[in-house]
Image (cartoon, helix red, strand yellow):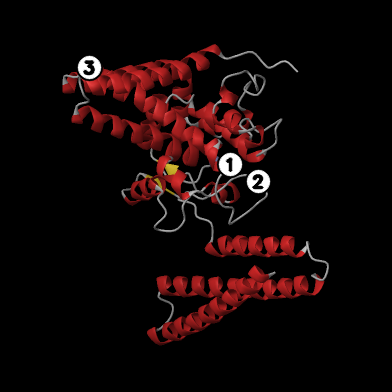
Amino acid sequence: MAKPPLIWTNVIIFTSTLLATLVLVPWYQLTIGFDMFVITAAIISLFYCGLSITAGYHRLWSHKTYNAHWSVRLFFAIGGAFAMQNSALHWSSDHRVHHKFVDDNDKDPYSAKKGFWFSHIGWMLRHYHADTYNDYSNCRDLQKDPIVMWQHKHYLALTILTNVGFAVAVGLASGHMMGSLIAVGVTRLVLSHHFTFFINSWAHMWGSQPYTDKNTAKDNALLALFTHGEGYHNFHHIFEMDYRNGIKWYHYDPTKWLIKILSMVGLASNLRKTPQVKIEQAKLAMVLKRSHQRLDLRHDAEEMKLKLQAEYEQLVVKLNAFYSLKKKLFEDKKRKLVKEYDLKQLREQLNDLQESFELQRQAWLKLASHA
Ligand SMILES: [Zn+2]
Ligand SMILES: [Zn+2]
């Protein structure tokens, strides 16, 4: 079958900016040398672009994981144009299709099953889905957001204005116009592009699958460093309504921290979080599934399978009891419904339950790992 026609604008932008970066950065560094002010401005711009995509395009608009004040939305809309990744409306439409039909080679716009090149950049180089964008029908909600529609309408002007404007402004302020055009203008754009593209390619190929193996999405802590926290993609694909991607406090997820800070100063609200009990249960279910898969290779495994299944069910009951007691403790405390004495008793109960749950979990994981 003949390939769809090339999208020349994209081919030229991606190729020329990459070539310019590869040639101009070493040349400029060896002949003149980058100024510290310019380098700092380029790094800040890189974060501005990246976070506008992750916190704005992705977690706010595509997934509605929180609500944001208009000033924040405007800030992300401008940053998204600066990142040159199409309008928020177009981007979110693609992304919602990606989640709905993940890995479906016909429907997922950047299906990782079509290989690294295609999911990284190839999907943007040809008219693969020319018929998809007639009305953005999967983004009716976003069409009610005047900032999204304003950005969509003026996308081209905003893109040129931000990409030329920021680089020229830093050039004027530092007195190093050429250096700024190379670092803030071009290099920042190339890095920002490929760091985001990694989420569609790398994050669907290399890493672990602690929560689900129903799609190719992987958790990858190294990738999180480049993608402002979006490397925890296995978690994201199963719990897409969560404003976090890295759920542990030590997971590098600056997007999550930014959203949290915005909520603390009143600029974001309704931050959605998956109940911890669901997360734990997904993890346990994956361990069970993997053990069963291993046992399938043995013909004497029926008994072991039944044992694991029974233990798993017991564990899930305990898990639910633990989290509902925890919730009750938390709510009672909040409402000040209980006396200090009752609270102490409740807390002891919780500790006992947690201890026995942990013991059973350890024993079960051992059993499952030998399966
Ligand atoms: Zn997503
Ligand atoms: Zn994905």
Label 2 with label 3: CB-CB less than 8 Å: no
For residue 77, say whether it is visible: no
As measured in the structure, the alpha-carbon distance from the residue carrying label 1 to the one carrying label 3 is 39 Å
Q: Residue at x 60, y 50 (%)?
A: 238
For residue 107, say whether it is visible: yes
Chain-order first, disc 2 or disc 1: 1
Give the x, y percent position of residue 124.
56, 23
In the image, what residue type sits under mark 3?
Answer: Met
Quarter occupied by residue 17: top left
In the image, what residue type sits under mark 1?
Answer: His
The yes-or-no answer for disc 2 within 8 Å of ligand 2 is yes
- The quarter of the image that holds ligand 1 is top right
Label 2 with label 1: CB-CB less than 8 Å: yes
The C terminus, quarter of image:
bottom right
As measured in the structure, the alpha-carbon distance from the residue carrying label 2 to the one carrying label 3 is 47 Å
**Vertical arrangement, residue 114 with respect to residue 230, above or below:** above
**Pick the front one: 180 or 330:** 180
Give the x, y percent position of residue 278.
59, 61
Residue behind mark 1: 204
Residue 175 as seen in the image, left or right of residue 342: left
Q: Residue furthest front?
A: 30
In the image, what residue type sits under mark 2?
Answer: Asn
Residue behind mark 3: 177
* Numbered disc 1: secondary structure: helix
Q: Residue at x 56, y 60 (%)?
A: 279
Residue behind mark 2: 215
Residue 23 as seen in the image, left or right of residue 85: left
Q: Residue furthest right?
A: 299
